[in-house]
Amino acid sequence: MSCLGICEGRRAKDVELQIKSLANETRIRILLVLQDGAKQLNEIVQIIDKPYPSVIKHMGVLIKANWVEKTGKRYPVYTLSNSTLTERIMSLCHMHCLGIGM
């Protein structure tokens, strides 16, 4: 199936949302932190050294774009969503950080 066959209508909007959500350094840093495993919000705030309200905002964008999943209510835990696209993006981020293919 061609890319056009896959990326039509709502699916194309979902892909667009996912790609646009990556156009921010803080969100990419959050994804890289979560690649090491599930984290609570306070851990993410401490690791990326950004204000709590800022991290909350970025987490909302990542959840809406299906990059991150949130479980638990009183003490929520955040993890990367299970998707091939997530794996590919994380590989690209690592290649960029290592200077491979640049």
Image (tube, rainbow, N blue to C red):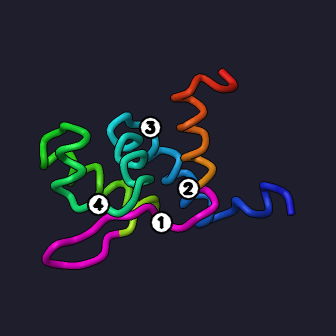
Q: Nearer the viewer, residue 19 or 42?
A: 42
Q: Nearer the viewer, mark 2 or mark 3?
A: 2
Q: Quadrant of residue 98?
A: top right
First in sequence: mark 3 vs mark 4: 3
Q: What's the residue at 60%, 44% (across, down)?
A: 91
List the residue tagged with mark 3: 23
Q: What's the residue at 19%, 47% (across, down)?
A: 45
List the residue tagged with mark 4: 39
Whole-number angstrom distance, CA of label 2 to CA of label 4: 17 Å
List the residue tagged with mark 2: 86
* Disc 2 + disc 1, Cβ < 8 Å: yes
- The residue carrying pointer 4 sits among few (fewer than 14), some (14 to 19) or many (20 or more) residues within 10 Å by Cα, namely some
- The residue carrying pointer 2 sits among few (fewer than 14), some (14 to 19) or many (20 or more) residues within 10 Å by Cα, namely some
Q: Does 11 appear above or below 33? A: below
Query: Where residue 52 sits in the image (x, y, percent)?
Result: 13, 48
Whole-number angstrom distance, CA of label 2 to CA of label 1: 7 Å
Which stretch appears magenta? 70-85
First in sequence: mark 3 vs mark 1: 3
Query: Label 1 is placed on what type of residue?
Result: Ser
* Disc 3 + disc 1, Cβ < 8 Å: no
Query: Where residue 59 sits in the image (x, y, percent)?
Result: 29, 55
Q: Does 102 appear above or below 68? A: above
Can residue 71 be seen in this snapshot? yes
Whole-number angstrom distance, CA of label 2 to CA of label 3: 15 Å
Query: Where residue 86 sits in the image (x, y, percent)?
Result: 55, 56
- SS of the residue under disc 4: strand
Q: What's the residue at 22%, 71% (across, down)?
A: 76
Query: Where residue 51 sits in the image (x, y, percent)?
Result: 13, 41
- SS of the residue under disc 2: helix
- The residue carrying pointer 1 sits among few (fewer than 14), some (14 to 19) or many (20 or more) residues within 10 Å by Cα, namely some
Q: Which image quarter holds the N terminus? A: bottom right
Q: Which image quarter holds the C terminus? A: top right
